[in-house]
Amino acid sequence: MTKHTFFIGFMLFALFFGAGNLIYPPTLGLEAGTSYWSAIAGFVITGVGLPILAVAAIGLVKNDATELGKRVHPIFGIVFTTIIYLAIGPFFGIPRAANVAYEMGISPIVPPTLIEGDLLLLLFTTVFFGLVLLLSANPSKIVDRVGQWLTPILLIAVAALSIGGFFLLDEPLQLPIEKYQTAPFFKGFVEGYLTMDAIAALAFGIIVVTAFQERGVKDNRTMVMSTIKAGLISGVALTLVYGSLGWIGAKMSTQGNFENGGQILSSATQLIYGDFGLLLLGIIVTLACFTTSIGLTVACGQFFSRTFQVSYQKVILIITVVSFLAANLGLNQIIAISVPVLVAIYPVAIVLVILSFIDKWFSGSKLVYRGAILLTAVVSIYQGLVEFGLPMAAIQPLMEELPLFSVGLGWLLPAVVGGAIGGFIDHK
């Protein structure tokens, strides 16, 4: 394994490790309590395992997610991939990262008497997105800038927080709240959706592939093995970080009531390191969200410029401007809209990635892809509409009959049945 693989793996970790990766593990730990290890195991599967598979799938086709989507239909490939890039890019992912960096990294250390909140957010996002635009302008330098410099600083800061948490937080674990009392593994599995990493991997995969191609990797087998190795490096780092942050959350259950993972981490860092803890957390959050925003901007820029034949520089300028405007709407509004969209598209992305790895088993039949994706989408879109608050009473009883529906995996059996029906029709 070469040093290039390590640096690309470090880069991938930094690209993955953003806003959702910081917020959700502490909340899971706090709520799961004594069921923590089962819950975090499920979380790691969707938050780490699936992203690694998605990166490897992109390495397999040596192209962006459009190539995977074309196995269903060319139009589906363009439309679904565009939705993914818009979701993880300027509409939700990038603005959310900037807002979390502001809420957890800047707002706590700037006295409200010094500068008004809305104005502070405006000033912060102006500087934040200006730097994102600057560092995204030359994609070939992203491995050097992120993998060699920003990632080590981020890892050292996270390690300092984690080590302090293990030694200085010694409260016993509490009983889990109601939603983690039964099937905590599956609840953690669905919570892993919120990191957005499995669909982000479909975008980041092409950055990894391009990085290896620039370093002389050409043949398909070497490319797949290289992307898997880089994915494993980032996966090990993500697993350790998730486990540590989740454990800190589990140990904070007796310290009061918290609205989100950001408040949990803020209180934990103050307990562990005092006022210095806020500065440490600010460094972690700002770096994590900043590196992710750079990666998402580069990935979206490469996709839209190549797909729609537009200048890369113009695309990233549009992405940063739209992200800047969305970020100033506020974190709550972004999350309220993004959760239903993620619930709707995540299962489709999961099924598409899994099918790409077992493609040889059914000879790449388009009907298998179409059947599996169609029935998956029916269930996942229903769940997304429910999350959005739309009444779906007419079909609710039918959906609730699906196996594992109560734990958020109602799409699983329809995916298998749809694929089987497609394979049967193709065989006949």
Image (tube, rainbow, N blue to C red):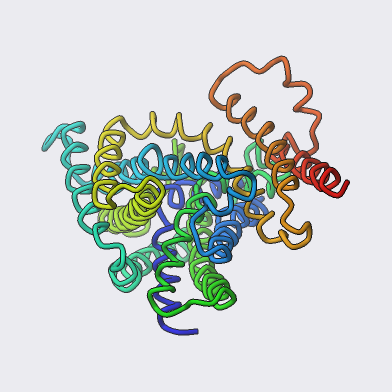
Residue 288 picture location, percent across and down: 35, 56
Q: Is residue 36 in view? A: no
Looking at the picture, does residue 323 appear above or below residue 166?
A: above
The outermost residue toward the bottom is 2
Res. 371 image quadrant: top right
Residue 403 picture location, percent across and down: 80, 37
Q: How many marks?
A: 0
Residue in front for this viewpoint, 306 or 393? 306
Left or right relative to 7: residue 98: left
Residue in front for this viewpoint, 103 or 412? 412
Left or right relative to 99: residue 203: right
Left or right relative to 104: residue 134: left
Instruction: Please tell me which residue is depicted at 61% across the width and 54% down the height of the picture.
Output: 40
Instruction: Please tell me which residue is depicted at 60% across the width and 61% down the height of the picture.
Output: 53
Res. 273 image quadrant: bottom left
Instruction: Please tell me which residue is depicted at 46% across the width and 42% down the height of the picture.
Output: 82
Residue 109 picture location, percent across and down: 22, 47
Q: Is residue 300 in view? A: yes
Looking at the picture, does residue 265 appear above or below residue 207?
A: above
Residue 372 picture location, percent across and down: 73, 43
Instruction: Please tell me which residue is depicted at 83% across the width and 42% down the height of the picture.
Output: 421
Residue in front for this viewpoint, 307 or 158? 307
